[in-house]
């Protein structure tokens, strides 16, 4: 491991020097017309270019082959390996490769031009993203990795800089530059570290053979960072970071972000397990758990309208509505000190029998599913109350529309009974008190 890092730093210096020269002179690569520079990639400059044959804008990724012979062979082989690996993949969450070529000492890959931003730039502006957005991004990345893994390709460098967020929140995985296929002839030199130290898996740090579970670990690191605003393994130098990856257990997510649910703590802990066998078996399983977590999360408190506090009136009886209130409705309501004689369906029927017509009583009995009271029960319950005279009976529907009385019929009868019940309760209260 120690001999690999300085060697890689030397290669990076050579590439940087070549990039400076390349930027000043290049205007065309193969048939592609260079429009401008998009940025510096891991292996060279990335350009915006135009394919004149089909009038399509593409991104051109380059690599300098102006190196020592042994380095040139390795870099060129790894570069074409990227084209071969990524060119086999056709998935909505993986950047599409169109073409590969070579012009002098410059090899290049023409790929899909994405209008969006690197996730790294997004996190630089807003280190801790909302939970829903984080889960949506990571689920998409996991889906893309699952597809790549099914095709025998391990990315080996999953990190925010290699994730593009395009329009409508769609996500694309880029840069399979150090991807390793099961059938690849290029092998990493013994002890040479590939990948970004903060996102490497323990097996990458130790230079051991890796498989798709290494990508799952790296994605777990990225998820941790997106939820907390900091990477789980950090240090003053590469060696300190690697020691942390091998030995440290990061604090639970919700100790740094209280909004994180417990379920997400367990998901990330499983993805960051030191031993590959203790992690998710595949990225698809990882994505499924993240979806389940997202679906189980309650709506944001900000999305729920907040009810205004209720100030009880003087001498009022508080009434609280809560979940399961439908079941509570079947329970007896609290009374205000009235005798049970007046606080029952039977009492209502007795009142109806004393004040209403036989038709009203029959209808109320059917509604309440209570037998009609006997005259004896009525006389025992309360003093007899005279029935209303004919002139006091409800007026027809025309009168109701004018607001003077209720019409006959089901709704009118029930309303009349309710009013009379209140009158009787008032009379009884007067007698009692």
Image (spheres, grey):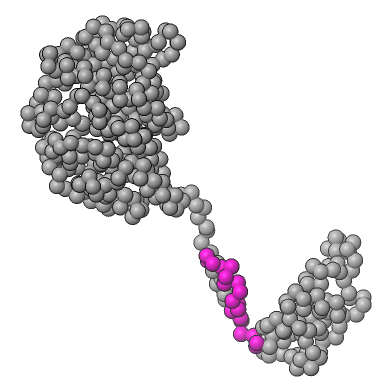
x%, y% of residue 10? Answer: 11, 21
Q: In this view, which residue lies farthest toward the left?
A: 3
Q: Quadrant of residue 89?
A: top left
Q: Is residue 188 above or below residue 26?
A: below
Q: Residue at x 82, y 87 (%)?
A: 385
Q: Give the tally of numbered discs.
A: 0
Q: Of 123 and 67, which appears nearest the observer? A: 67
Q: Quadrant of the C terminus?
A: bottom right
Q: Is residue 12 above or below residue 433?
A: above
Specify whether residue 308 is in view. yes
Q: Is residue 314 left or right of residue 232?
A: right
Q: Is residue 387 left or right of residue 194?
A: right
x%, y% of residue 85? Answer: 30, 25
Q: Quadrant of residue 337?
A: bottom right
Q: Residue at x 36, y 34 (%)?
A: 147
Q: Quadrant of the N terminus?
A: top left
Q: Quadrant of residue 211?
A: top left
Q: Residue at x 28, y 23 (%)?
A: 82
Instruction: Reply yes or no: does residue 150 show up in magenta.
Output: no
x%, y% of residue 430? Answer: 71, 87
Tell me the chief SS of the magenta region: loop
Instruction: Reply yes or no: does residue 328 show up in magenta.
Output: yes
Q: Residue at x 13, y 38 (%)?
A: 206
Specify whether residue 125 is in view. no
Q: Is residue 78 above or below residue 391?
A: above
Q: Is residue 359 left or right of residue 231?
A: right
Q: In this view, which residue lies farthest toward the front?
A: 183
Q: Which residues are magenta?
A: 322-340
x%, y% of residue 26? Answer: 28, 7
Q: Of 409 and 42, which appears nearest the observer? A: 42
Q: In this view, which residue lies farthest toward the right?
A: 390
């Amino acid at each position: 491991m120690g001999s690999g890092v300085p060697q890689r730093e030397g290669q990076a210096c050579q590439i940087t020097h070549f990039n400076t020269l390349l930027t000043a002179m290049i205007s065309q690569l193969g048939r592609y017309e260079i429009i401008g520079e998009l940025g510096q990639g891991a292996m060279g400059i990335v350009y915006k270019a135009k394919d004149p044959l089909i009038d399509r804008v593409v991104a051109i990724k380059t690599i300098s082959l102006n190196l020592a012979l042994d380095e040139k062979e390795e870099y060129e082989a790894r570069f074409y390996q990227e084209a071969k690996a990524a060119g086999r993949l056709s998935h909505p969450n993986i950047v599409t490769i169109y073409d590969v070529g070579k012009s002098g000492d410059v090899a290049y890959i023409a790929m899909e031009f994405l209008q969006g931003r690197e996730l790294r730039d997004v996190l630089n502006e807003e280190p801790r993203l909302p939970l829903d957005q984080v889960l949506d991004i990571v689920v998409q990345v996991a889906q893309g990795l699952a597809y790549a893994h099914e095709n025998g390709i391990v990315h080996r460098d999953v990190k925010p800089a290699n994730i593009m967020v395009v329009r409508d929140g769609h996500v694309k995985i880029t840069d399979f530059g150090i991807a390793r296929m099961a059938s690849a002839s290029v092998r990493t030199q013994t002890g040479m570290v590939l990948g970004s130290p903060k996102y490497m898996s323990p097996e990458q740090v130790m230079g051991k053979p890796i498989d798709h579970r290494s990508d799952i670990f790296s994605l777990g690191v990225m998820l941790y960072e997106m939820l907390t605003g900091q990477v789980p393994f950090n240090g003053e130098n590469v060696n300190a970071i690697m020691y942390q990856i091998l030995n440290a257990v990061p604090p639970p997510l919700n100790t740094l972000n209280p909004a994180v649910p417990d379920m997400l703590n367990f998901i990330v802990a499983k993805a960051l397990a030191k031993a590959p066998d203790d992690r998710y078996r595949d990225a698809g399983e990882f994505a499924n758990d993240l979806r389940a977590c997202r679906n189980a999360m309650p709506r944001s408190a900000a999305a729920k309208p907040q009810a205004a506090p209720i100030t009880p009136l003087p001498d009022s009886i508080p009434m609280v509505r809560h979940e399961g209130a439908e079941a509570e409705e079947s329970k007896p309501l609290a009374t205000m000190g009235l005798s049970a004689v007046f606080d029952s369906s039977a009492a209502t029927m007795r009142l109806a029998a004393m004040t209403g017509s036989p038709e009203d009583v029959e209808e109320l009995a059917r509604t309440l599913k209570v037998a009609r009271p006997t005259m004896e029960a009525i006389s025992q319950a309360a003093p007899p109350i005279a029935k209303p005279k004919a002139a006091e009976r409800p007026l027809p529907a025309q009168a109701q529309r004018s607001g003077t009385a209720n019409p006959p019929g089901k709704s009118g009868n029930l309303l009349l009974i309710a009013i009379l019940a209140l009158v009787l309760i008032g009379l009884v209260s007067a007698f009692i008190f």
